Image (spheres, rainbow, N blue to C red):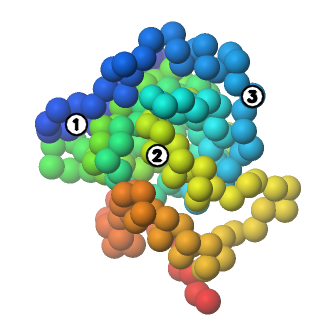
Amino acid sequence: MRGRQVSVPYEGDRVDVFAESEKSAVLAALATTAPGPTLDCYGGYVEILSKSAEFWVLRGIVPPGSVVPAHSHEDPEDFLILSGSQQVLVADGDQMVWRDANAGDYIRVPGDAIHAHRNVTDQPAIDLIITSPRLGRFFEEVGRPVTADMQPPTPEEVAGFVAKSAEFGYKLASVEENASYGIDLPVFSG
């Protein structure tokens, strides 16, 4: 089904990222802002398209065969799947389940909701992401510029990512939690 909403269930008040902005502000910002560099954010790539005091607009890329491990953060995120398909880990009652998300689907992730993304296809999944300035700055600070000869992150880079995650309230699920969702994390040795 195209254009369906894949929503993460949430108990409590929803935070409306767009409460004080014009709905057309996203499109206007996209039309007038040159994109920033593509950043490797440890599982997916992010390109910053627009920054404002109210929200940031990003393009997210989940490469074929990659996974964004389970995590949560206080700030909400909205995803519009522009192309490709991916699976999104969401709560279904008291269980976490993988749901397919395809081009045209919308995903709303409220603050503090555990979620993950994985691409089990041979094509990249590309998302338009709307989030808070704080979460946008997190991606900007942890991201490594993508290069033609990109190497896997070093143990020191992973340690820096973990430290920066804690600083921004970006909560990483443990290796065991990820394994319970079918996510195998690499072992880093130094």
As drawn, is 106 to the left or to the right of 94? Answer: right
Whichever of labels 3 and 1 marks the residue nearer the N terminus, that label is 1
Whichever of labels 2 and 1 marks the residue nearer the N terminus, that label is 1
Residue where numbered disc 3 is placed: 34
Q: Secondary structure at mark 2?
A: helix
Classed neighbour count for the residue bearing mark 3: other residues with Cα under 10 Å, few (<14), some (14–19), many (≥20): few
Residue where numbered disc 1 is placed: 9
Nearest to the eye among marks 3 and 1: give it: 3
User: Along the line of sight, which residue is nearer the eye, 46 or 61?
Assistant: 46
Percent position of residue 189, x then y: 58, 87
Q: Do labels 2 and 3 touch, CB within 8 Å?
A: no
Seen at 54% across and 25% down, the residue is 103
Residue 135 is marked as 2
As drawn, is 90 to the left or to the right of 37? Answer: left
Q: Is residue 139 visible?
A: yes
Above or below: residue 144 compared with residue 128: below
Q: Secondary structure at mark 3?
A: loop
Which amino acid is tagged 2? Leu
Which amino acid is tagged 1? Pro
